[in-house]
Image: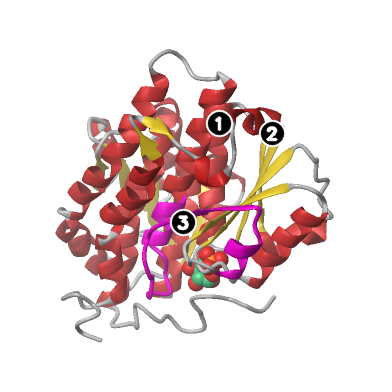
Amino acid sequence: EAAEKGGYEHFMMKEIHEQPAAVRDTISPRLKDGKIDLSELALDEEAIRTVRRVYIIGCGSAYHVGMAARYVFESLARLPVEVDVASEFRYRNPVLEKDSLALVISQSGETADTLAALRLCKERGVRTIGIVNVVGSSIAREADATMYTWAGPEISVATTKAYSTQLAACYLLATEFARVRGTLVDGQYENLVAEMEALPDKIEKILADKERIQWFASKYANAKDAFFIGRGLDYATALEGSLKFKEISYIHSEAFAAGEMKHGPISLVENGTLVVGILTQPDLFEKSVSNMVEVKSRGAFLMGLTTYGNYSIEDTAGFTVYVPKTDPHFATSLAVIPLQLLAYYVSCAKGLDVDKPRNLAKSVTVE
Ligand code: G6P
């Protein structure tokens, strides 16, 4: 097993480090001469133009990819998107329009609820695309078309590289939809493609600074609660950061849309409560800062996660992590890395079973 871990102490850390390559392997084969090529999905321009609505369905982290992808799709392609947790999808008896497209996201391709949601879409005449990591899995076989994420085998129960490659797959789809629908401004398409291609190197750069996060994590190993807050796309990132944190550290954690703190959750903030504020979206920066000031005045200790250049965050946050600039639509791919590391190092500091957290399974094949 030591050999399989490639010199790392845990599979999770190995897989965290495999992310630059996994993201590159997912993006590169789908770029031909600087243009996105989705011919594997038999989704030509005419088919794209007929799509009126997008459903994104998944469980756990795959659902969080959907939450992020919704912002990207709606903002770039101006298409309405609904995101559902697969375990709820069927029970709301959804109104499924025929000229819509369902993106069904799953690492294993075997999650029972996700598979059931896929079948419901097919029954109702909705075209389905599986975004799947395991080749030949049930969802890959049953979806009308499959876009594989080339993350390679993921062993750690807490997903990292599969999540990152699912995001990448969604960027490719959203950007291509936007091009075909004519919703981009001049030069934006080329810029988005270039920013996508630059993501692996930027992830690498964040990983090179992991010791700083290890140091910070060691101080919070005994925390009782943690909160992750953000607005817009940063809220989607907060959801994933919080899930990672709770599942392997066993510390109670929740994610909130930053503006919602004052509608209840802020009453949970005590002296020293860890609040992680994610602020990668330029339009929302000031608004999120003011939400951070609100929790700080109730005693919270703030970790700020933002892009290089936003140094004013240090007036508010007690500890700051900067990630490289990218197109704001793709910021989740960078901001999630320090959050994965934070969860990992807290779990290690507590001496927990990082790769196999209690009560959890890698793939959930019961409903
Ligand atoms: C389990 C895993 C999660 C994963 C979820 C969905 O709960 O522990 O990491 O996000 O299932 O799995 P899938 O294979 O469908 O992506």
Tell me, yes or no, whether the two marked residues, 2 and 1, touch with CB atoms within 8 Å. Answer: yes
Q: Position of residue 217 (x, y in %)?
A: 26, 64
- Foreground mark, 2 or 3? 2
Q: Secondary structure at mark 3?
A: helix
Mark 3 close to ligand 1, CB under 8 Å: no
| Residue 240 numbered tag | 3
Tag 1 or tag 3, which sits nearer the N-term?
1
Earlier sequence position, callout 2 versus callout 3: 2
Instruction: Find the distance from the CA under tag 3 to the CA under tag 1.
Output: 25 Å
Q: Which residue bears the numbered disc 2?
A: 51
Mark 1, residue position: 177
Residue at mark 1: C-beta within 8 A of ligand 1: no
Q: Residue at x 68, y 68 (%)?
A: 113
Q: In this view of the protein, which residue sits in the foreground, 278 or 275?
A: 278
Q: Specify the segment rendered in magenta.
A: 137-166
**Image height check: is 303 above or below 12?**
above
Is 154 one of the magenta-colored residues?
A: yes
The CA distance from mark 2 to mark 1 is: 9 Å
> Farthest residue toward the bottom?
1
Give the residue drawn at x 38%, y 62%: 160
The relative height of residue 156 versus residue 19 in the rendered view (above or below) is below
Going 45% across and 71% down the picture, which residue do you hit? 247
Amino acid type at mark 1 = Phe
Q: Is residue 147 magenta?
A: yes
